[in-house]
Image (cartoon, grey):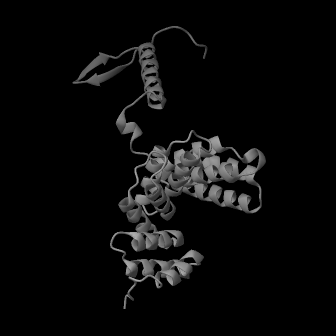
Amino acid sequence: MPFNNRVFFYTVTFGGRKLHKLSSLLLFLILLYLIGITTVQAKLLNDASYNHASIRDPFNLNDISYLAHWRQTLRHEAKQAMQEDASYLAVRLWQQLAQTGDRDAAFRLGLIFDVGKNQQHNPSLAVYWYRRAALAGEIHAQHNLGVAYAKGDGVTVDINQAIKWWTLAARRGNADSQYNLGILYAAGEYGIKRDLEQAKHWWHKAAMHGDPMAQYNLGTLYANNETHDYCAATHWWEEAAKNGVKQASLALRVIKTRGDYRPCH
């Protein structure tokens, strides 16, 4: 039947009386209006500037199982690429992971640009990725960032920044950072006040983690302090000697020639 512009009414019975309802044209207009409202609401829900917490907060992409599987796959492929000396592919894969906030991936990118050869050796990029990983709490990145500041590799030399990052890593158990802090405080250079107690504190922690040179240096501090604690010195030199420090073996022989030396047992 051909379309025409006539308005059709229909009726319903209400309370025993027939009531005229809205025409189909009016209903059609109302329907369009409702569709328009729905469209606006949908746009708001998809708009990044729409900040209603109940819409944004319930979902964390990092917790979605398929993303975890995707990350695991990328990590496996990146490690495989490194083993096959395909470092350019590894960089691309690590970057994809790092952009999702993966701190291990950011640290590995820092390593690639730190120790890489030729075009991949880029100290500034190494510092960039070390910092991203360090800020996320990766202790090895914190240590390496401290080294970069101490050496001025990819960044301006700043011993205070080196101490800052080494201290963060050292407090969380990084033996290399603990050892380096001991060196700084024992030497008292680069504007750092000499503090043998601080040096002993950090070397003791590193020594307890099995660091051979920290064990040797700690023994030397005990041997040369005011009380000449030869027993403690002997203990740490013996540990260092077991770990291959030749100076410790020599120190153990020399200490016994001192006139004030007494056996510990």
Q: Position of residue 209 (x, y in %)?
A: 46, 71
Q: Residue furthest front?
A: 259
Give the quadrant of residue 52.
Answer: top left
Q: Position of residue 130 (x, y in %)?
A: 56, 48
In the rendered image, is residue 16 in sight? yes
Q: Position of residue 144 (x, y in %)?
A: 56, 53
Give the quadrant of residue 75.
Answer: bottom right
Q: Residue at x 47, y 56 (%)?
A: 187
Viewer-nearest residue: 175 or 85: 175
Q: Residue at x 48, y 59 (%)?
A: 183
Q: Residue furthest bottom?
A: 265
Q: Is residue 258 left or right of residue 54?
A: right
In the rendered image, the quadrant that contains the C terminus is bottom left
Viewer-nearest residue: 85 or 110: 110
Instruction: Tell how many labels.
Output: 0
Viewer-nearest residue: 29 or 152: 152
Q: Is residue 2 left or right of residue 257?
A: right
Decide: is 123 above or below 225.
above
Q: Residue furthest left?
A: 15
Decide: is 76 above or below 128.
below
In the rendered image, the quadrant that contains the N terminus is top right
Decide: is 50 above or below 176.
above
Q: Residue at x 68, y 53 (%)?
A: 115
